[in-house]
């Protein structure tokens, strides 16, 4: 049963490729994706009664490939199914080729496999396939820049995953199993010192795939490269990167003796700050969004590693929220850049007048990512900082201030006269030239950013099956801090960001393949030594 989530998207991909009538095939695919959402919803509620386990090939659970559906994995499975349903709807009237759709839905099957698999070596295979498929889709339009960025993404991730393979081999040598649960049971009886090396070997590539500082530079190139199709950027930032954060959570659960949370808390804070600093430096709307993925992953890492129950719940909920508002922002950015024939934020204005539905969806998603009160990001950020000490709260406020400043800049294209990059004012208004399916897709995502704020407690209960409550006075306090940050952010943008030479310098900063390889080794060594001498 669980294997259907891997095989069905793959079969959909093959079906789309060989079916003679493309329009009928897309309609049937939309029905299949809706069926997967319904099936994952049913599985979601079935898993409330206990874990659902499937041994592929009917082998013993420690010997074969094990698929397991628990509360967390099924929640991400539901997120995956919903995301690809929205993407299918978005591309329904598009000109995507059969090959593109084939790769797109193979990608879905592989992502679902990562959320369900409990076998370390099987995860290695799925990670490699996911990387190759994503690289092909990044390079799909065969532009010089996209081919360069896609190959860089492929080489960096392939080099990093070798560390993971060595770590898995080390775990197998010590425990005799690849199954994560069985390995965790065996690891519980091993000395802490024996676990440092395999933990660092496995965690380094996962941190790279999470785009933590200093291993982040591949992400803006992959997510924001000019030639990458819009839906590819949306999936990369909204869903693809969540597989890495999900694996981070699972691997941390495997090594309870190693308290590495303090290390990743520091890295998360630095990642959040570096991400928004580089986002402020960009003028390309896709690169602004790409760097904010780095920043928001940093915030998620803070929540997951604070050692506080509410912060952990907030970090998990922020993963789902980020998938919604970042998918919406990338899809809207694709529509805007296609309409205005530019991606330069300073050459676009009047989006709300010319494309009102797209503009509204962009505004709601921007309010989600900045943590505007009553939007979904405000709830997850509230829980992340609910019990944090003053230093961590200060860091969270600073990161969110940077996000606010950046999205004041980003949202400037929504207002003003309806002009394109030539400066000529257009004589028509409205979304006449924007496909209706695309408008509905982005509006659904934007609306969910609002609903996820209004009913945040209910969403958390449904998704994570935990009961948490928002303290009214605490939420009002956070809302007042947000309003103060918004006012400060406006003046910072107007009088500092727009005039500072620092951001011009940051805009040209890049790390190549050799530099990334060096940083992989440095990060691995620092993590290993830190855990050995401090942990």
Image (cartoon, rainbow, N blue to C red):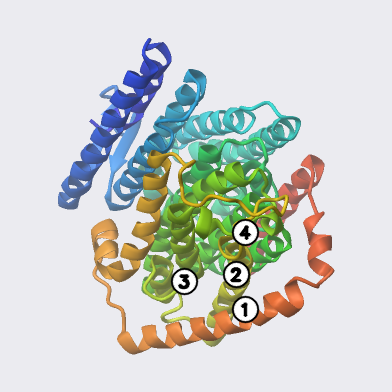
402, above or below 129, in the image: below
Residues packed near mark 2 inside 10 Å, few (<14), some (14 to 19) or many (20 plus): some
**Mark 1 or mark 4, which is nearer the start of the sequence?**
4
Residue assigned mark 1:
489
**Mark 4 or mark 2, which is nearer the start of the sequence?**
4
Is residue 12 in view from this perspective?
Answer: yes
**Mark 2 or mark 3, which is nearer the start of the sequence?**
3
Q: Quadrant of residue 249?
A: bottom left
Q: Secondary structure at mark 2?
A: helix
Comparing 306 with 372, the one in front is 372
Residue assigned mark 2:
408
Q: Are marks 2 and 1 in contact (CB under 8 Å)?
A: yes
Residue visible at 41% across and 76% down in the picture: 373
Q: Secondary structure at mark 4?
A: loop
Residue assigned mark 4:
349
Q: Quadrant of residue 134?
A: top right
State the separation of the CA atoms marked 3 and 2. 13 Å
Tell me where residue 347 appears, x and y as whole percent: 70, 55
Q: Secondary structure at mark 1?
A: helix
State the separation of the CA atoms marked 3 and 4. 24 Å
Residue assigned mark 3:
371
Q: Nearer the viewer, mark 3 or mark 1?
A: 1
Is residue 251 in view from this perspective?
Answer: no
Q: Nearer the viewer, mark 2 or mark 4?
A: 4
42, above or below 11, in the image: below
State the separation of the CA atoms marked 2 and 1. 8 Å
* Farthest front residue in view: 427
Comparing 438 with 389, the one in front is 438
Tell me where residue 381 appears, x and y as whole percent: 45, 72
Left or right of 507: which side holds 269? left
State the separation of the CA atoms marked 3 and 1. 14 Å
Q: Quadrant of the C terminus?
A: bottom right
């Amino acid at each position: 049963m669980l294997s259907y989530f891997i095989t069905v998207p793959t079969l959909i991909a093959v079906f789309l490729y060989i079916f003679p009538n493309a329009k009928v095939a897309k309609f049937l695919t939309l029905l299949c994706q809706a069926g997967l959402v319904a099936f994952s919803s049913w599985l979601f509620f079935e898993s409330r009664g206990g874990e659902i386990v499937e041994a592929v090939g009917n082998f013993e659970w420690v010997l074969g490939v094990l698929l397991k559906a628990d509360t967390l994995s099924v929640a991400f499975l539901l997120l995956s199914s919903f995301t690809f349903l929205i993407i299918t709807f978005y591309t329904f009237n598009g000109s995507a080729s059969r090959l593109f759709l084939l790769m797109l839905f193979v990608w879905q099957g592989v992502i679902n496999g990562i959320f369900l698999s409990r076998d370390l070596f099987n995860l290695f295979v799925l990670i490699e396939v996911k990387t190759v498929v994503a690289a092909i889709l990044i390079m799909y339009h065969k532009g010089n820049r996209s081919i360069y960025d896609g190959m860089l993404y492929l080489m960096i991730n392939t080099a990093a995953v070798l560390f993971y393979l060595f770590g898995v081999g080390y775990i197998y040598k010590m425990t005799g199993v690849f199954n994560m649960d069985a390995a965790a049971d065996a690891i519980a009886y091993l000395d802490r010192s024996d676990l440092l090396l395999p933990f660092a070997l496995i965690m380094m590539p996962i941190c790279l795939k999470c785009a933590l500082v200093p291993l982040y530079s591949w992400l803006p190139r992959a997510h924001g490269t000019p030639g990458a199709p819009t839906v590819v950027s949306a999936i990369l930032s909204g869903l693809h990167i969540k597989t890495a954060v999900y694996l981070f959570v699972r691997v941390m659960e495997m090594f309870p003796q190693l308290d590495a949370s303090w290390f990743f808390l520091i890295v998360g804070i630095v990642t959040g700050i570096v991400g928004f600093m580089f986002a402020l430096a960009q003028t390309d709307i896709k690169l602004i969004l790409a760097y904010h993925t780095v920043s928001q992953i940093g915030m998620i890492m803070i929540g997951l590693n604070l050692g506080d129950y509410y912060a952990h719940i907030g970090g998990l909920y922020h993963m789902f929220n980020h998938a919604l508002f970042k998918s919406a922002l990338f899809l809207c950015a694709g529509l805007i850049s296609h309409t205005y024939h530019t991606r330069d934020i300073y050459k676009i204005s009047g989006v709300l007048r010319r494309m009102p539905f797209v503009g509204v969806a962009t505004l709601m998603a921007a309010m989600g990512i900045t943590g505007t009160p009553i939007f979904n990001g405000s709830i997850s950020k509230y829980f992340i900082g609910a019990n944090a000490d003053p230093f961590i709260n200060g860091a969270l406020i600073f990161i969110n201030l940077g996000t606010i400043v950046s999205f004041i800049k980003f949202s400037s294209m929504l207002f003003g006269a309806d002009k394109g990059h030539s400066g000529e004012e257009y004589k028509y208004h409205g979304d006449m030239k924007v496909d209706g399916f695309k408008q509905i897709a982005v509006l659904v995502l934007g609306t969910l950013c609002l609903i996820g704020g209004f009913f945040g407690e209910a969403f958390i209960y449904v998704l994570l099956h935990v009961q948490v409550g928002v303290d009214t006075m605490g939420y009002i306090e956070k809302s007042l801090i947000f309003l103060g940050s918004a006012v400060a952010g406006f003046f910072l943008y107007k009088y500092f960001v727009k005039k500072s030479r620092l951001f011009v310098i940051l805009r040209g900063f890049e790390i190549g393949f050799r530099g990334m390889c060096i940083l992989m080794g440095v990060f691995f060594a620092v993590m290993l030594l830190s855990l050995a001498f401090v942990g």
